[in-house]
């Protein structure tokens, strides 16, 4: 449960912003600079997950107003956010990835939205790619069919309606709208949500944790909205792309854990077998391409990564 702050309510910051960072020093510099352009009364908490690139030292030197938490190990996204949330004292609590750049006063726009709509528990901004195009960030809850296709090699062959429905592509990007959930790269939530439904589930090291948490929030009767007038650039995956095989393992084990939790153990095991078969098939394809002399170094790297995934068995440990 989050820490109870006994300060007079007038002394609480409007927003506590939690940023979990791992070896993205240069991006974190830009992220924090964009955050502090806000007109809000902010408390900014950076949880450094044992970075080796000088991130923690940079924060201490250049952003002394930031509350820096150094657990001394790689907490993962979920545990890191929980550590920050437990220390947060703001009326609202935001989660923000370090590979983001807040445009204008987007944070204030999101806070104003929550203040105007007491029935809304969470609001997410419109995320942009670095070329200015809109990044998909609003979602409906996934079905098992979604899980079989989304972010696998079969995604291009998915029935058009499956991923279109999941990614809410039947609505305009610039339309203010209620959604099932928003991606965890940037969102702001009411403090009381954590008191009602608990913290993020640390059984998810990273990926699907915000989906699981927002499913619990929706089940408690709160609304979740997407506010496109607030915009944040998200460069995407800059921490996880440093460890490709482990990223895939975390992504798919989290997906399996989610479907086991909400669709039953059988559904989770079906998805696990299906995903492992996908990787076995890709190993065969990449091996044949390598034997034929097509970009052999790349093929060898991919085969090595895919074998690591297979060796993991995509086993959910908790």
Image (cartoon, grey):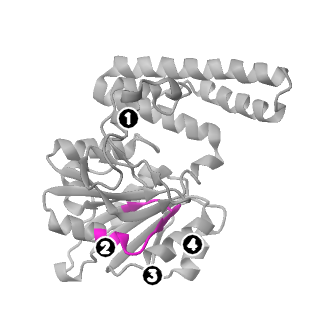
Cα separation, mark 2 vs mark 4, equals 20 Å
Residue at disc 4, secondary structure: helix
Tell which tag, 2 or 3, sits nearer the viewer: 2
Q: Which residue is mark 4?
A: 29
Give the image quarter of residue 318.
Answer: top left
Q: Which residue is mark 1?
A: 164
Residue visible at 63% across and 41% down in the picture: 244
Give 120 or 154, whichever is nearer the viewer: 154
Give the image quarter of residue 7.
Answer: bottom left
Give 224 or 192, whichever is nearer the viewer: 224
Q: Which residue is mark 2?
A: 108
10 Å neighbourhood of mark 2: few (<14), some, or many (≥20)?
some
The answer to whether any part of residue 89 appears in the image is no
Cα separation, mark 4 vs mark 1, equals 35 Å
Residue at disc 2, secondary structure: helix
Say if 37 sits above or below 141 in the image: below
Tell which tag, 2 or 4, sits nearer the viewer: 2
Q: Which residue is mark 3?
A: 65
Residue visible at 81% across and 25% down in the picture: 290
Magenta stretch: give its range: 95-109
Q: Of marks 2 and 3, which one's residue comes earlier in the chain?
A: 3
Residue 74 location (% of width, % of height): 55, 53
């Amino acid at each position: 449960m989050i820490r109870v702050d006994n300060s007079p309510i007038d002394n609480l910051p409007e927003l506590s912003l939690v940023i979990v960072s791992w070896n993205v020093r240069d991006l974190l510099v830009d992220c924090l600079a964009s955050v502090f352009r806000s007109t809000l009364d902010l408390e900014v908490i950076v949880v450094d997950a044992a970075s080796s690139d000088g991130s923690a030292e940079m924060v201490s030197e250049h952003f002394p107003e930031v509350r820096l938490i150094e657990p001394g190990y790689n907490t993962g996204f979920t545990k890191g956010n929980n550590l920050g949330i437990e220390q947060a004292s703001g009326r609202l609590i935001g989660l923000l990835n370090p590979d983001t750049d807040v445009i204008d006063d987007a944070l204030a726009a999101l806070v104003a939205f929550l203040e105007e709509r007491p029935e809304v528990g969470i609001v997410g901004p419109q995320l942009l790619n670095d070329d200015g195009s809109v990044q998909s960030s609003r979602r409906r809850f996934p079905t098992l069919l979604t899980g079989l296709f989304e972010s696998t090699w079969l995604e291009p062959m998915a029935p058009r309606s499956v991923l279109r429905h999941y990614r809410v592509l039947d609505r305009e990007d610039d339309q203010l709208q209620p959604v099932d959930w928003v991606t965890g790269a940037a969102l702001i939530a009411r403090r009381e949500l954590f008191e009602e439904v608990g913290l993020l589930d640390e059984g998810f090291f990273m990926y699907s944790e915000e989906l699981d948490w927002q499913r619990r929030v929706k089940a408690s009767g709160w609304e979740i909205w997407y506010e496109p007038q607030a915009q944040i650039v998200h460069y995407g995956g800059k921490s996880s792309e440093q460890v490709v095989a482990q990223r895939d393992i975390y992504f798919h084990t989290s997906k399996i854990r989610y479907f086991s939790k909400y669709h039953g153990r059988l559904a989770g095991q079906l998805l696990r077998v299906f995903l492992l078969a996908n990787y076995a098939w890709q190993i065969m394809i990449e091996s044949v391409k390598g034997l034929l002399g097509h970009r052999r170094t790349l093929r060898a790297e991919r085969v090595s990564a895919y074998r690591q995934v297979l060796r993991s068995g995509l086993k959910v440990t908790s």
